[in-house]
Amino acid sequence: MIVNLFFAYGGYFGEFDKSEFSIEDVIVEFAEQLSLGNTKFHDQNVGMWHKVLTHGITPKEFLKELSLYVEQV
């Protein structure tokens, strides 16, 4: 699945600096796009994972960060 993301959207794992990644920005963008009805959940989810991976963040790291973010809110 991960390889397919890079074929479909381009880029590679770690293409962008991790310090440029903001979980809050990703969540807000995800919610805004869904509420506007511009995209389907699956499409938005795939795009989110592509963004996560191109910033060199593993799925395990992202889910941990997401969990911590949700606990704070």
Image (cartoon, rainbow, N blue to C red):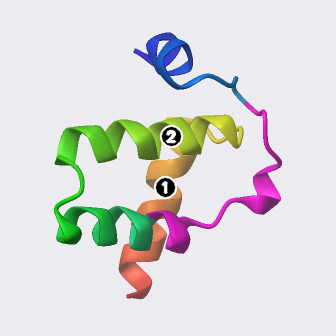
Q: Secondary structure at mark 2?
A: helix
Q: Crowdedness of circle 2 by 10 Å Cα count: few (<14), some, many (20+)?
A: few
Using the image as rendered, state which of residue 22 and residue 61 is in the foreground.
22
Q: Is residue 6 above or below residue 14?
A: above
Element at label 1: helix
CB of mark 1 within 8 Å of CB of mark 2?
yes
Residue 62 in the image, given as x and y percentages of width and height = 52, 50
Residue at image position (35%, 62%) is 30
Name the spot of residue 5 as percent of width and height, x first: 47, 21
Residue 56 placement, left or right of 61: right
Amino acid identity at mark 2: Lys
Kindly identify the amino acid type of the residue bearing the numbered disc 1.
Answer: Lys
Residue at (60, 35) in percent of width and height: 53
Please provide percent x and percent y for residue 54: 66, 36
* Residue at numbered disc 2: 60
**Residue shown at 70% from the left, 23% from the top:** 12
Mark count: 2
Residue name at image x 44 percent, y 46 percent: 48
Percent coordinates x, y for residue 52 in the rendering: 57, 44
Magenta stretch: give its range: 14-26
User: Is 64 displayed left or right of 1 in the figure?
Assistant: right
Q: Quadrant of residue 51?
A: top right
* Quadrant in which the C terminus is drawn: bottom left
The one nearer the camera, 24 or 61, is 24
Residue 15 among those drawn in magenta: yes
Q: Label 1: few (<14), some or many (≥20) within 10 Å? A: few
Q: Is residue 16 magenta?
A: yes
